[in-house]
Amino acid sequence: MQHFHFHFRKALVTLIAAAAFLACSKSSPAAIECDGSADCTGPVDSAVARLGLGWTVRMAGKDSGLKSVNYSGTEFGTVGDSGGMFTSTDGLAWTRRSPPTNLALSSIVSISGKWVVLNDSYEEPGWVTVSGDDVTWQSHSGLTENIKCAVYAGGMVVAVGNTFDRATDVGMVSVDGLTWTNTKLPTNRKLLGVASSGSLYVAVGGTLQTSVDGKAWALADSSQVFMRSVAYGAGKFVAVGENGSVVTSPDGKTWTAGARTGRDLYAVLFTGKRWVAVGLRGVIVISDDAVTWTAVPSGTGRTLHGLAMNGKTLVAVGDSSTILTSP
């Protein structure tokens, strides 16, 4: 048991620091493996054990609806409508930042301590900006894609979205956040989420798709209802979506539908102890196995769009600049 505990804590610290397994909620850290076990029933850090059970509203009522949140290894960052962005070192106190845009920001990921912020605005599709200090920004425009979600894994950012005319799903990859290579995906079913297990990428939306390199994609399943977010943890992918739909897969190819939880779910994350999903009108549901889900009070009626954690604090973000933390 001590041997298990040691390796779990070591894996927990390593994965969080590397921020390797990320998923969009629009964007959130996803997987923390429990020392290779599939059920994560071993001892975990006491802070991790409490994540998702109780929530506190830290901020609300400001102008920007927040769509994505992530953790860089030193701070949380969240972005959303009208160029809105906030950062926090602990998830409790937040500072407004000013990326050089008033576009709708859809996703935020971290590369070597730098924030990469992407948008899905049809006013200026394909606009990306990068900052290492939250003050000075280097921007790039001219791409023709609207990005819905991005994940940093395998030494590169993998993003999914659709073309400006919404006719074709697209994927893009970048090692620095500024230079991008485009890849078309095999459908036009509107992709909204992407996650990585470390060896496989999964994108979700109107279809479920997989890729081993983030560049060549294959259709995995088109029979499921519309999914909005996907995460990896405890040896499986979990996707959530419309009407509280939840589907799971051990390999990204074969998916099993579970019982619906009710309201639309927009983000899912694995804490190392349990699955947490958030969504419409402040709904938060938790599960130890991604099969049986229980609703917990959120303290807000505002829709929640994103999840992220730093190992001891779980952050949820949503409409009207709502930010919640757990425990």
Image (spheres, rainbow, N blue to C red):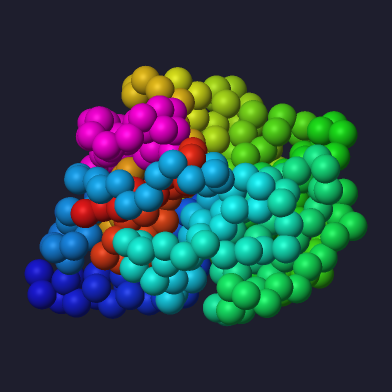
**Residue 65: % across, % down:** 54, 42
**Residue 8: % across, % down:** 25, 70
The residue stretch that appears in magenta:
277-304
Q: Quadrant of residue 208?
A: top right
**Residue 18: % across, % down:** 47, 74
Q: Is residue 98 left or right of residue 186?
A: left
- Position of 283 relative to 273 (above/below): above
The one of 128 and 210 positioned closer to us in this rendering:
128
The one of 82 and 118 positioned closer to us in this rendering:
82
Tell whether position 147 is magenta.
no
- Position of 180 relative to 50 (above/below): below
Q: Is residue 139 left or right of residue 110?
A: right
For the N terminus, the image quarter is: bottom left
Tell whether position 284 is magenta.
yes
Residue displayed at 54% across by 32% down? 227
Q: Quick check: can you spot residue 274?
A: no
For the C terminus, the image quarter is: bottom left
Residue displayed at 22% across by 60% down? 48
The one of 70 and 274 positioned closer to us in this rendering:
70
Residue displayed at 44% across by 41% down? 61
Q: Is residue 66 left or right of residue 55?
A: right
Q: Quadrant of residue 287?
A: top left
